[in-house]
């Protein structure tokens, strides 16, 4: 039971993958601190972390995202292979199918150039090679009026990243959480809904109506449905719900949420689909890579445990931004699969013809304007978020940066010894490259 | 009466100062176009334009804001002096009172340097000179425990801008509106509440459920409480209400609203206050300038018509950001004057001791992250906003830029022949300097 007011050193709000990873590094590097992790759900990792496609890639156009993801992915490999904690990490690779026009576009050239500069594994396949590897792939829309009407671009190239793959986000959450719980002084608490951040005058003058504009003020804790928790530092890892806590105290998170859906298709009873799923030649594991189609933002993730695919779609203009994620954003729309995704999918991969979802769900992306995450400290609150749809693959780096910032280190040491200035992902004096390769 | 659907070339949503100025330049430079201006209020300029302090300054730190304001102010002078349209523009000047610490701060040095480079009139007064000019000004807090408790910084310098002043925003709205109405083909319409922007597939395929993700789409008009209005271009000049129309179609305005209040004090019956109001030596018009105190964000504007002052306060951390401005933001808080503003004001200017507001109101600032406005065109909608609390003083330049962007001109010609790239204030590929001098 919580008493009506309680004091810890750090309270972390949000036990998604970013919250648990941050809890782990904070406790590891600040062993004397009393760190309390809370979430409004009844367990860790139940919100967007659980909804994600949990694909991981280092194929970004900005050196910022390249560094965040590449070091995180290498850490995940280390966890699985050296520590021996199975994250179900499978190196299926990522495959971007591109049209002639896309491939020769300035932004794609820059993307490839920047990957080369960063030594990110990236191989180009031409149309003929793709067709040999994936016989079912339709690379010829000649005479297909429907494809033309649908603005579908013909596949001419494939951009393949061998160091990318998929994992199980639940396992990843468990890994960090177990690590944290082992060394922490207080147990994480669930069903704790943080309603507001408590702002107080510093120093308080005990006058009614404080704080006044002429007083210095800072965040001193959180008000929850289970009482107040006071802390020297409040860490916000609330993902798509950052605004509901930051706006009321006058911090603009610069992020907004957008709904994202996933539809599950089974391949077990369809030979042609199974063949696509088990495509040989890309990686050691005989799997079609995580694949992005040239048009309409449609993509799929191989799912070998359930012998099938997870289908997603990165719809842009026309899909609403939300101020914060609402319950409505958790409801998948069957018409969206039927009318928007399916026609595209079955044009490029005829094997999907007549495939219907056996399951579906939806969650939210928390978008940053430059599609680069935020990590900053302001007036007693340390915010980690804005992962823009790629928070699983950046979680390790973001958590290390948050910890470095907490400790007042100017550089954060990421896995493998690379570093990033701990203020690079700040709200102000941000030192990042804008990201252009967003799914 | 509106029919149920109507077609114009351009519909402008929002008849605040920015909307009417944009209407004026668009119609002037595109005489054949049918341009309809609508607002949900029953007349033009009734929202935040009417709530503003309507002070104008070219004393910004970013060359972007310097250019926007300096050319706009020069145009206002031209309107008043050459065209002979009285805007009640009075060159009272702006006076920043600064402490030693503030004056020697990097950011202030950069601000002064940048003003010099741009030939912006700016004079430095020292403490002694200030005391001579404004005998009531308290420049010595020695031994004042209260002042120390309140974190008040002692005045050491004054930064004075002679080309700044105040005007009547209603007159400014009328000026542009009259100009627009004289040449426009359709009368502005009031009481028209735009509920959504209409997004359609391009080309439409007449299928139920359109637009689908694989279709190109654009904004083709607005849905209002009085029926649909279709237009080739929709101009959004909705200030602090931009999100409620842009978010639903997936455009992140990057702006958020914050409440701002004004309290009116009369000086007529108080000799000491009258003396402050009629301070000689700063300008030809024997007026205290628009004055910003060193602490807590408190400022005042002389108001000679009603022989008094308008008092405001730029509270930052702790004052909530709103997703959009709500009715609550229109309610001034008397305790805010009493507890937050008054104690500060009366410390620096003892003449205000016991002064109580005779009137007050509140409105909203529409903040951009870099405190620089936005002008951009995307998918059929042209957005002009994010003026960050200085939309009156930038209105002329913003409207000219919006018009240039509409006409596809790469450069916007501002008043006096200076130019700005018409895409400089865009959402993407923004070419601006971050603004640091925000009140
Ligand atoms: C459909 C979909 C597909 C995706 N695919 C991928 C992918 O392939 N790869 C990838 O890297 N990323 C992907 N993402 C994005 C990824 O899921 C997120 O970036 C990541 O989960 C963010 O982690 P988080 O910890 O910030 O968020 P969350 O997991 O959402 O955690 C936030 C936590 O904060 C809690 N919380 C919020 N507010 C409060 C409050 N007031 N009080 C108490 N608790 C609160 C919530 O309950 C939640 O548990 C996808 C997302 C979606 C929706
Ligand atoms: C207290 C205060 C002091 C200020 N002081 C200054 C100052 O000294 N100097 C300065 O330059 N600026 C100042 N400002 C800022 C200035 O008022 C604004 O920047 C400026 O008015 C913005 O003009 P606008 O036309 O964008 O906004 P508005 O005047 O708010 O106009 C927006 C219009 O859009 C209409 N609208 C919105 N949504 C819809 C819809 N869905 N359907 C139909 N109509 C809609 C509204 O009714 C409104 O008329 C101040 C603001 C406040 C609140």
Image (cartoon, coloured by chain):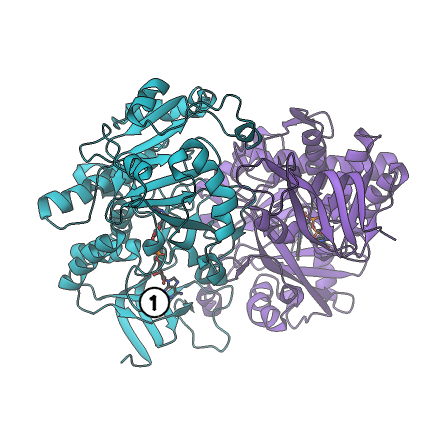
Chain colours: A cyan, B purple
Q: Position of residue A156 (x, y in %)?
A: 41, 21
- Residue A137 drawn at (x, y percent): 37, 28
Quadrant hosting residue A280: top left
Q: State the residue at coordinates (57%, 60%).
A: B138
Quarter of the view holding residue A148: top right
Q: Is residue B147 above or below residue A117?
A: below
Q: Is residue B265 visible?
A: yes
Residue A433 appears in the rendering: no
Query: Residue A165: x percent and y percent?
Result: 26, 39
Residue A90 point in image, percent of width and height: 21, 41
Q: Quadrant of the C terminus of chain A?
A: top left
Q: Which residue is mark 1?
A: A41
Depth order, front residue of B68/A139: A139
Displayed quadrant of residue B58: top right
**Does the closest atom of ligand 1 sit within 8 Å of the Cβ of label 1?**
yes
Q: Is residue B19 above or below residue B339?
A: above
**Residue name at image x 60 percent, y 44 percent:** B210
Above or below: residue A4 compared with residue A283:
below
């Amino acid at each position: 039971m919580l008493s009506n007011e309680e004091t810890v050193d750090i309270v972390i709000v949000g036990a998604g993958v970013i919250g648990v990873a941050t809890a782990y590094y904070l406790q590891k590097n600040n062993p004397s601190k009393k760190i309390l992790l809370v979430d409004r759900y009844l367990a860790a990792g139940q919100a967007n972390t659980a909804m994600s496609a949990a694909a991981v890639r280092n194929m970004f156009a900005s050196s910022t995202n390249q560094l965040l993801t590449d070091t995180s992915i290498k850490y995940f490999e280390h966890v699985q292979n050296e520590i021996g904690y199975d994250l179900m990490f499978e190196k299926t690779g990522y495959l971007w199918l591109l049209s002639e026009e896309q491939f020769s576009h300035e932004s794609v050239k820059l993307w490839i150039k920047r990957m080369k500069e960063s030594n990110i594994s990236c191989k180009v396949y031409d149309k003929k090679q793709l067709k040999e590897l994936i016989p079912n792939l339709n690379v010829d829309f000649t005479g297909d009026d429907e494809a033309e009407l649908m603005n579908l671009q013909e596949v001419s190239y494939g951009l393949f990243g061998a160091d990318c793959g998929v994992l199980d986000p639940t396992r990843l959450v468990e890994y960090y959480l177990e690590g944290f719980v082992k060394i922490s002084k207080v147990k994480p608490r669930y069903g704790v809904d943080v309603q507001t951040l408590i702002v107080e005058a510093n120093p308080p003058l005990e006058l009614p109506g404080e704080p006044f504009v002429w007083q210095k003020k800072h965040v001193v804790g959180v008000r929850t449905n289970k009482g107040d928790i006071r802390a020297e530092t409040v860490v916000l890892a609330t993902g798509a719900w950052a605004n509901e806590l930051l706006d009321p105290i006058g911090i603009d998170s610069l992020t907004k949420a957008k709904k994202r859906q996933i539809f599950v298709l089974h391949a077990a009873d369809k030979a042609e689909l199974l063949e696509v799923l088990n495509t040989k030649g890309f990686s050691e594991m005989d799997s079609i890579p995580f694949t992005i189609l040239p048009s309409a933002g449609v993509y799929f993730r191989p799912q070998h445990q359930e012998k099938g695919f997870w289908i997603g779609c990165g719809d842009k203009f026309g899909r609403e931004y939300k101020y914060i994620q609402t319950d409505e954003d958790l409801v998948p729309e069957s018409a969206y699969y039927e009318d928007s995704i399916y026609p595209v999918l079955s044009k490029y991969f005829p094997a999907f013809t007549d495939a219907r979802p056996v399951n579906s769900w939806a969650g939210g992306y928390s978008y940053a304007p430059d599609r680069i995450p935020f990590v900053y400290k302001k007036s007693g609150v340390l915010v980690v978020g804005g992962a823009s749809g790629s928070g699983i693959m950046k979680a390790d780096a973001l958590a290390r940066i948050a910890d470095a910032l907490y400790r007042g280190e100017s550089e954060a040491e990421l896995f493998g010894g690379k570093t990033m200035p701990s203020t690079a992902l700040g709200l102000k004096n941000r030192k990042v490259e804008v990201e252009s390769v967003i799914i």
